[in-house]
Image (cartoon, helix red, strand yellow):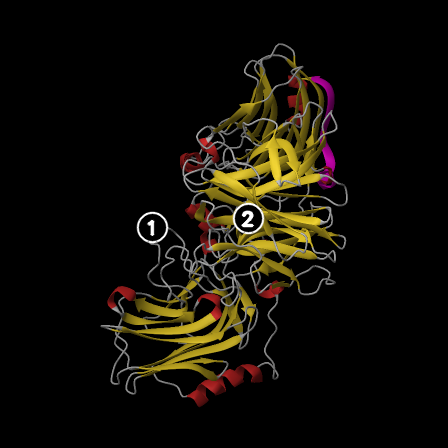
């Protein structure tokens, strides 16, 4: 088939939020290879099986970036390959598929019309390395065989004198002709990496011929195969550089899907932050640990994937969220949720340590062979809800919280302690609320976090305990209590029983994780900002979600929670675009009239002079038909963001309203009525912080690129004592 004229499908050939771009090509073994992005790239090949075939050989060079795990949409299917070449109709046992199974093994399936013959290899390919793979079908002799790097690695026998039945489906490179989930846009079992010199022969090539093809790759490269680096086949963030919704100064992966940042740790002069990632596409599934490193928690660098599911490890079905701490030698250790759906319970806590603790970026991590903590039995917990370890050291003892839920009850955070760092003792429940009184807290608590806030006026040390509820009836937000943590009893006593929302953004601000910054002693919170877009939007844009700004949490004089973006974010400020003191609304708006940026910070202090409601209009079109309003209502004592007119596109409004409300509102009491508002606009991202006490995180997907206007808004007279606007630079 080499040299045939084939159509290439790729999401950005017809992009929706950025300029169109062609599929990506990379230097390969023979000549130039096509980079398959893991979710949208495929090649429509000629109709190879117009008639039945009694002999077939398929060969290819492949440099995998990742492998699939158990199928995201059909977890009971254990033989679904990521196809190098596929023209297979499973319902009728017709056609063939040759590809890579989860965790990197190779397989070949041949539909014989009334049954399917298959051959599987236990040999695992390596990511970021070239491999030559081949499969042969000899119907006359009844033999199927697999080859890796010129060597036969598996074979199987069937009844002789059989043929591969013609399949009336498309023949594709990189994906299945028939998707696992026909209702959605994603196929979770596509090739992720580079393919080169894909060849299909209507003959059974001999082992010697396949060995010669393998050797030809060496001969074409002076006796060695090309190196495969992250720069060459890793996700390329420049693909999205003119996407008008993709943030520039919020942390996000180089591409595809992410969920909560977690496991922050400072080591050898750098901050490390990890995140849930699906490097195979912008959808949930195939959970890995992404990795950033930074000097200041603001400017981040992308590093290779830190943890990936492995067949022979404790985590074949996903490396889920966790935490980080230092061992007895002061070296980092990651605690993470290991997924293994072959077991019940299917979640446990595992650990990983740096392969080289003296390495500059801690790029490679080695997993422990044994689990660190397993779900306790006989105490009434839900069967498969045991995840998200949060770890820290207090004195000479390490502590670990694990999110869980009680059967026929509500969520809980379990506590463990250890003096040896290896044997963990179950200490009970940190805290449980009354599920009947607070059903919004759901049946399971994910991502438990416990951080010190400082001493209150009596000298009592206060902590904040944060959770993310999930499950039927849960309000998936970040709730918290302020109270006292007692290490000796491993218990937490809240000051008030009622939980509080830390952000009013209605399923935008989620996924808490945090740590005490050893450089400053501050308690820092990291979160994920959900984008609430549709699967189709994710497919076409190629990315999903980003981190929120890092936040400093502290105790205010009155005992309430203080919340503010970390001061290091000021390093992003460019020349001040607007500066004004002691002006009225008209004066301020005249100064703001020429602002056209979509990546900026605003600081404003507004004092009512007759107005009852006052705040900021942002992301406003010159005609006023697109706008987002944030205001304080002094009568109701509420902070509100209205998004009913954030986009004039009806489909956009419908999509975002299915996942989040168009009006976000919550309590805010101001003694003197003075509103101190900080606004961060980062393309589609909007973050409002009021008086260091309340926050609203949300999104605005404007239809027009001209919707960049900013105004002071009020229903009466106000005075503005201070107004500053800074353009903010990219963090990359």
Farthest-out residue, bottom: 208
Residues drawn in magenta: 569-583
Circle number at residue 183: 1
Give the vertical position of 461 relative to 428 (above or below).
above
Residue sitting at x 72%, y 62%: 357
Q: Is residue 620 above or below residue 517?
A: above
Report helix, strand or loop for mark 1.
Answer: loop
Can the viewer see residue 242 in this picture? no
Q: Where is residue 86 in the image (x, y as percent from the top left)?
A: 36, 69
Q: Earlier in the sequence, mark 1 or mark 2?
A: 1
Question: Furthest-top residue in view?
Answer: 610
The residue pinned by badge 2 equals: 388
Residue 570 part of the magenta-drawn span: yes
Residue 408, given in percent of the width and then of the height, sits at 41, 39
> Which one is in front, 97 or 316?
316
Q: Quadrant of the N terminus?
A: bottom left
Do we see residue 262 in this rendering?
A: yes
Q: How crowded is mark 1: few (under 14 residues within 10 Å), some or many (20 or more)?
A: few
Q: Which mark is residue 360?
A: none
Task: Give the quarter of the image for residue 78.
Answer: bottom left
What SS does tag 2 mark? Answer: strand
Q: Depth check: 384 or 615 in front?
A: 384
Q: Is residue 241 left or right of residue 584?
A: left
Gap between marks 1 and 2 measured at Cα = 31 Å
696 in the magenta segment: no
Image x and y of residue 636, in percent: 54, 16
Query: In screen coordinates, is 393 left or right of 236?
Result: right
Q: Quadrant of the rendered structure where residue 428 is?
A: top right
């Amino acid at each position: 088939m080499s040299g045939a004229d084939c159509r290439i499908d790729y999401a950005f050939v017809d992009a929706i939020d950025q300029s169109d771009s062609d599929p990506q090509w990379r230097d390969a073994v023979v000549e130039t290879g096509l980079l398959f992005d893991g979710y949208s790239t495929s090649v429509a090949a000629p109709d190879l099986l117009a008639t039945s075939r009694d002999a077939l050989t398929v060969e290819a060079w492949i440099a995998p970036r990742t492998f699939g795990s158990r199928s995201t949409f059909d977890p009971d299917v254990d033989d679904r390959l990521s196809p190098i070449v596929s023209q297979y109709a499973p319902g009728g046992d017709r056609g063939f598929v040759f590809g890579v199974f989860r965790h990197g093994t190779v397989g070949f399936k041949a539909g014989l019309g009334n049954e399917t013959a298959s051959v599987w290899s236990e040999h695992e390919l390596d990511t970021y390395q070239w491999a030559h793979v081949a499969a042969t079908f000899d119907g006359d002799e009844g033999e199927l065989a697999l080859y890796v790097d010129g060597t036969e690695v598996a074979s199987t026998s069937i009844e002789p004198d059989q043929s591969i039945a013609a399949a009336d489906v498309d023949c594709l490179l990189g994906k299945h002709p028939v998707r696992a989930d026909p209702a959605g846009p994603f196929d979770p079992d596509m090739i992720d990496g580079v393919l080169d010199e894909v060849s299909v022969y209507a003959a059974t090539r001999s082992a010697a011929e396949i060995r010669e093809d393998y050797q030809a790759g060496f001969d074409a490269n002076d006796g060695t195969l090309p190196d495969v680096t992250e720069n060459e086949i890793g996700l390329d963030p420049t693909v999205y550089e003119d996407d008008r919704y993709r943030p520039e100064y919020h942390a996000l992966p180089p591409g595809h899907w992410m969920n909560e940042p977690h496991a922050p740790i400072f080591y050898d002069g750098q901050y490390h932050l990890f995140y849930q990632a699906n490097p195979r596409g912008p959808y949930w599934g195939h959970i890995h640990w992404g990795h950033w490193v930074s000097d200041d928690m603001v400017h981040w660098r992308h590093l290779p994937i830190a943890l990936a599911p492995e067949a022979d490890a404790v985590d074949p079905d996903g490396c889920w969220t966790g935490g980080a701490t230092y061992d007895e030698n002061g070296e980092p250790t990651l605690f993470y949720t290991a997924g293994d759906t072959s077991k019940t319970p299917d979640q446990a806590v595992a650990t990983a340590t740096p392969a080289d603790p003296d390495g500059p970026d801690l790029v490679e991590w080695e997993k422990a062979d044994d689990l660190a903590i397993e779900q306790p039995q006989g105490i009434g917990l839900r069967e498969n809800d045991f995840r998200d370890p949060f770890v820290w050291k207090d004195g000479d003892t390490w502590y670990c919280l694990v999110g869980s839920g009680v059967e026929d009850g509500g969520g809980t955070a379990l506590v463990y302690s250890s003096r040896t760092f290896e044997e963990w003792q179950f200490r009970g429940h940190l805290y449980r609320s009354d599920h009947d009184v607070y059903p919004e807290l759901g049946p399971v608590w994910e991502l438990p976090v416990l951080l010190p806030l400082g001493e209150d006026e009596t000298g009592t040390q206060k902590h904040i305990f944060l959770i993310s509820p999930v499950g039927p009836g849960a309000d998936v937000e970040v709730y918290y209590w302020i109270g006292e943590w007692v290490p000796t009893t491993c218990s937490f006593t809240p000051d008030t029983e009622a939980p509080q929302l830390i952000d009013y953004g209605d399923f935008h601000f989620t996924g808490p994780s945090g740590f005490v910054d050893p450089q400053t002693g501050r308690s820092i919170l990291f979160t994920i900002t959900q984008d609430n877009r549709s699967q189709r939007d994710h497919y076409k844009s190629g990315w999903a979600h980003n981190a929120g700004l890092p936040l400093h949490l502290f105790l205010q004089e009155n005992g309430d929670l203080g919340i503010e973006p970390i001061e290091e974010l000021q390093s992003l400020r460019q020349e001040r675009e607007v500066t004004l003191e002691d002006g009225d609304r008209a004066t301020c708006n005249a100064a703001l009239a020429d602002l056209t940026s979509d990546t900026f910070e605003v600081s404003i202090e507004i004092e009512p002079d007759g107005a009852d409601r006052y705040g900021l209009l942002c992301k406003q079109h010159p005609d006023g038909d697109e706008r987002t309003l944030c205001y304080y209502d002094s009568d109701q004592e509420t902070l509100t963001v209205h998004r009913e007119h954030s986009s004039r596109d009806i489909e956009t409004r419908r999509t975002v309203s299915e996942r989040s409300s168009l009006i976000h509102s919550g309590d805010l009491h101001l003694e003197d009525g003075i509103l101190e508002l900080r606004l961060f606009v980062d393309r589609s991202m909007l973050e409002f912080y009021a008086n260091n006490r309340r926050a609203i995180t949300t999104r605005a997907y404007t239809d027009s690129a001209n919707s960049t206007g900013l105004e002071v808004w009020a229903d009466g007279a106000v005075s503005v004592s201070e107004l500053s606007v800074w353009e903010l630079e990219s963090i990359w």
